[in-house]
Image: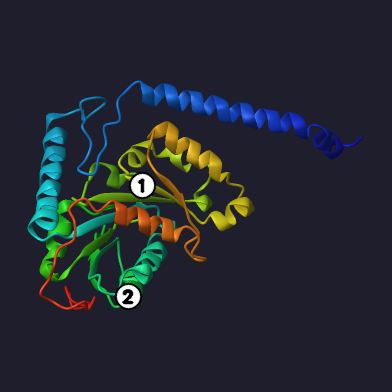
């Protein structure tokens, strides 16, 4: 018997070892996150536990939350605009998911999009091709959007002509966690191509999400990612957070995501004097 034959005979042991590792990881995550209450929400973290180490940091984060709250008031209460943020890594499929959501939107829904990228406007061009109003924000060295950048971008829209505003954050799984943008909902998009441990490595951002999307499930087997494991990790890190599996390219699960976002409208629809042309807002700039 050669070495490779010996390995093949031990496959049941390998499977058992893998399952034991999974269980131990789950126990460790549960221990860590049961020790503190979930503190994240769409307007930022409550840093009472494990929070900032300096008064300056606390003041900065408080100012961010206050600015995000002001944006929420302006959008939701002053103009009746429903805002949804999409966060997640570069290459996870946020833009394509957003395209699919726009394609499925009712014809009379006026949509605007703020696109955050470090540089360029590739994503903005893709979204403008769908006839929606788009403001492109290049952050330079910054790895996330912040309420100040969002407030500036809002000046490019006539908010009275919008029903829904999507905010596509810069591709990053760390930085956006402490920078709420004032949206009604934060959708976190993780991809099977990011590895089976992506949720365990980024618990803070997961905790800020109202919905977690597991995208690219069509290639999960090819890249060796267990989708059920990702679901379990989300439940461990942020119990009760809805999880939707999607294949944005093929369309699987997109209808479920669209339905979940429609159900999440907490401030109702509002009537506009303007017609249903989606290009209203920033004029496609």
Indicate the secondary structure of the residue bearing disc 1. strand
Q: x and y percent of residue 53 in the render? A: 20, 27
Find the residue positioned furthest to the left.
78
Q: Residue 278: name its quadrant.
A: bottom left
- Residue at mark 2 to residue at mark 1: CA–CA distance: 26 Å
The residue at the point 57 percent across, 57 percent down is 218
Residue under the image location 12 percent in, 70 percent down: 272
In this orientation, does residue 262 appear? yes
Q: Are marks 2 and 1 in contact (CB under 8 Å)?
A: no
Picture disc at residue 125? 2
According to the image, label 1 marks what residue?
A: 211
Give above or below for 43 relative to 109.
above
Q: Point out residue 66 in the picture as x, y percentages from the top left corner.
A: 10, 43
Which residue shows up at 69% across the image and 28% down it? 16
User: Which residue is the extreme one toward the right?
Assistant: 1
Q: Is residue 47 above or below residue 176?
A: above
Is disc 1 surrounded by few (<14), some (14 to 19) or many (20+) residues within 10 Å? many
Task: Answer few, some or many: residues within 10 Å of disc 2's Cα (few below 14, many 20 plus, some between 14 and 19).
Answer: some
Foreground of the two, 109 or 182 = 109
Q: Which disc, if any, is residue 221?
A: none
Q: What is the tally of numbered marks visible in this picture?
A: 2
- Do we see residue 169 in this rendering? no
Residue 226 left/right relative to 187: right
């Amino acid at each position: 018997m050669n070495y490779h034959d010996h390995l093949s005979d031990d496959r049941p042991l390998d499977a058992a070892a893998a399952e034991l590792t999974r269980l131990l990881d789950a126990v460790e995550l549960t221990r860590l996150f049961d020790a503190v209450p979930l503190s994240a929400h769409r307007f930022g973290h409550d840093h009472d536990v494990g929070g900032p180490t300096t008064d300056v940091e606390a003041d900065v984060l408080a100012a961010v939350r206050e600015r995000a709250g002001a944006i929420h008031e302006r959008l939701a209460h002053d103009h009746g605009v429903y805002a949804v943020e999409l966060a997640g890594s570069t290459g996870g499929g946020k833009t394509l998911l957003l395209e699919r959501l726009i394609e499925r939107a009712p014809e009379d829904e006026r949509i605007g999009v703020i696109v955050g990228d470090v540089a360029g406007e590739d994503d903005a061009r893709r979204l403008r091709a769908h006839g929606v109003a788009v403001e492109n924000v290049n952050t330079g060295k910054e790895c996330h959007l912040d309420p100040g950048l969002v407030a500036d971008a809002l000046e490019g829209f006539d908010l009275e002509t919008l029903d829904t505003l999507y905010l596509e954050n810069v591709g990053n799984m760390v930085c956006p966690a402490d920078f709420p943008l004032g949206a009604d909902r934060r959708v976190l998009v993780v991809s099977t191509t990011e590895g089976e441990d992506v949720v365990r490595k980024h618990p803070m951002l997961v905790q800020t999400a109202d919905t977690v999307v597991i995208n690219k499930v069509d290639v999960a087997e090819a890249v060796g990612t267990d989708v059920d494991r990702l679901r379990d990790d989300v439940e461990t890190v942020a119990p009760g957070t809805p999880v939707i599996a999607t294949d944005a390219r093929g369309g699987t699960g997109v209808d479920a995501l669209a339905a979940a976002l429609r159900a999440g409208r907490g401030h109702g629809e509002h009537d506009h004097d303007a017609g249903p042309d989606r290009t209203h807002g920033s004029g496609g700039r």
